[in-house]
Image (cartoon, helix red, strand yellow):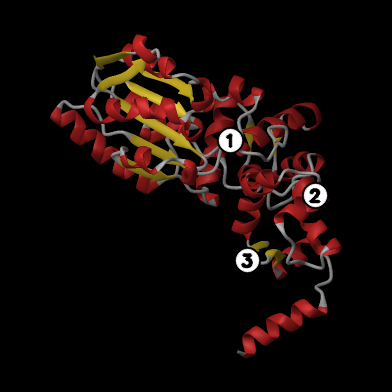
């Protein structure tokens, strides 16, 4: 999934190149205005009291800036940040080691926190509430109960699967923020800022074209911007106009709404093989050769946001907008069903 240029998931190229594009302060962080306003108040209050910031949970689709926001929180709080990921913390001892290394006021950032094991997760509970560690080592007669105090710290968790977090863990976060897809104006600001950092000569038309095809996701925007920069360097004397940007993204098979070849294939499968649906997710997965979880977590959210796909109790169905976008004739039964609905 990371190979898709329009995927919000992190890939190796992003890991290498995103660092220089990430904002360092909240004033440079574009979008998510409500989240920023609430964080500004919470951080100012914590500083005035001389206390660590309440534990923060960030959730939403990949590529929207959760890791960036965690780093900004650390910067604004003038604190060190320790970064890890849920799958990397395999044993209770791993979590205990992380927690005993944090200093007063430090930020501990756990990405993909929903993937923490249950036993590891339970180590966090007393640490988040009372800044203490309590666990048992060994078994039987050799079992030992260990209790340690840890320095007051702030846990920042990030997840794309909020529903997979256990209720006890969710309840221990002082603040929970959802990051939403960005609108066109915010995306244009992000593309303009990144182009400036890259020293790319680009006009407003080029900025708008890239922003429009970025699926409301900064990571995708920066990825497309790098590909447009390559194209402009080789074929357009280094200047990214609207036409140059459109040609570059056309070669990548990213259309004007940010849909790629895989998105088109998924929609066409429902339209042509299943007459627009409804079709069950398992049947659709078998037809497209993709895992059902991948369809639900990676492909469907953006298509649903665009209004191209509906999830119904009977399965997935296409909308009129999807047929119009694909340029496929709308089935007569689809028109009849809609007419009946309006008559009621």
Helix, strand or loop at mark 3: loop
Q: Is residue 152 visible?
A: yes
Q: Which residue is mark 1?
A: 219
User: Who is closer to the viewer here, 137 or 199?
Assistant: 137
Q: Which residue is mark 3?
A: 313
N-term mark: 2 or 1: 1
N-term mark: 1 or 3: 1
Helix, strand or loop at mark 1: helix
Above or below for 46 versus 146: below
Q: Which residue is mark 2?
A: 286
Q: Select label 2 or label 1 by which is in front.
A: 2
The extreme bottom residue here reads 343
The extreme top residue here reads 142
Cα separation between marks 2 and 1: 30 Å
Q: Is residue 103 visible?
A: no
Q: Residue at x 63, y 41 (%)?
A: 203
User: Who is closer to the viewer here, 23 or 174?
Assistant: 174
Task: Give residue 210's position: percent from left, percent from top.
Answer: 65, 43
Cα separation between marks 2 and 3: 19 Å
User: Who is closer to the viewer here, 238 or 80?
Assistant: 80
């Amino acid at each position: 999934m990371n190979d898709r240029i329009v995927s919000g998931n992190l890939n190796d190229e992003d890991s290498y190149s995103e660092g220089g594009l990430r904002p360092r302060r909240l004033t440079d962080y574009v979008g998510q205005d409500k989240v920023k306003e609430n964080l500004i108040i919470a951080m100012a209050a914590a500083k005035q009291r001389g206390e660590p910031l309440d534990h923060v949970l960030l959730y939403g689709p990949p590529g929207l800036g959760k890791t960036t926001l965690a780093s900004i929180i650390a910067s604004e709080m003038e604190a060190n940040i320790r970064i890890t990921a849920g799958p990397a913390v395999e044993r209770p001892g791993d979590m205990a080691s992380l927690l005993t290394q944090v200093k007063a006021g430090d930020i501990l950032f756990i990405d993909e926190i929903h993937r923490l094991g249950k036993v590891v997760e339970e180590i966090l509970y007393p640490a988040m509430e009372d800044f203490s560690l309590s666990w048992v080592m060994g078994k039987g007669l050799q079992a030992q109960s260990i209790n340690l105090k840890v320095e007051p710290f702030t846990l920042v968790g990030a997840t794309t699967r909020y529903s997979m977090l256990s209720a006890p863990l969710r309840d221990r976060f002082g603040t929970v923020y959802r990051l939403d897809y960005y609108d066109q104006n915010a995306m244009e600001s992000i593309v303009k800022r990144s182009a400036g950092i890259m020293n790319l000569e680009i006009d407003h038309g080029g900025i708008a074209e890239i922003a429009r095809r970025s699926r409301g996701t900064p990571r995708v925007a920066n990825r497309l911007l790098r590909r447009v920069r390559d194209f402009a360097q080789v074929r357009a004397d280094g200047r990214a106009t609207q036409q140059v940007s459109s040609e570059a993204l056309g070669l990548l098979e990213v259309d004007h709404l940010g849909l790629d070849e895989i998105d088109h294939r998924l929609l066409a499968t429902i339209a042509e093989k299943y007459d627009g649906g409804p079709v069950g997710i398992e049947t659709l997965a078998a037809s497209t050769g993709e895992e059902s979880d991948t369809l639900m977590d990676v492909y469907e959210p953006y298509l649903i946001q665009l209004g191209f796909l509906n999830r119904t109790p009977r399965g997935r169905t296409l909308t009129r907008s999807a047929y119009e976008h694909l340029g496929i004739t709308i089935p007569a039964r689809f028109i009849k069903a809609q007419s009946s609905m309006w008559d009621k």
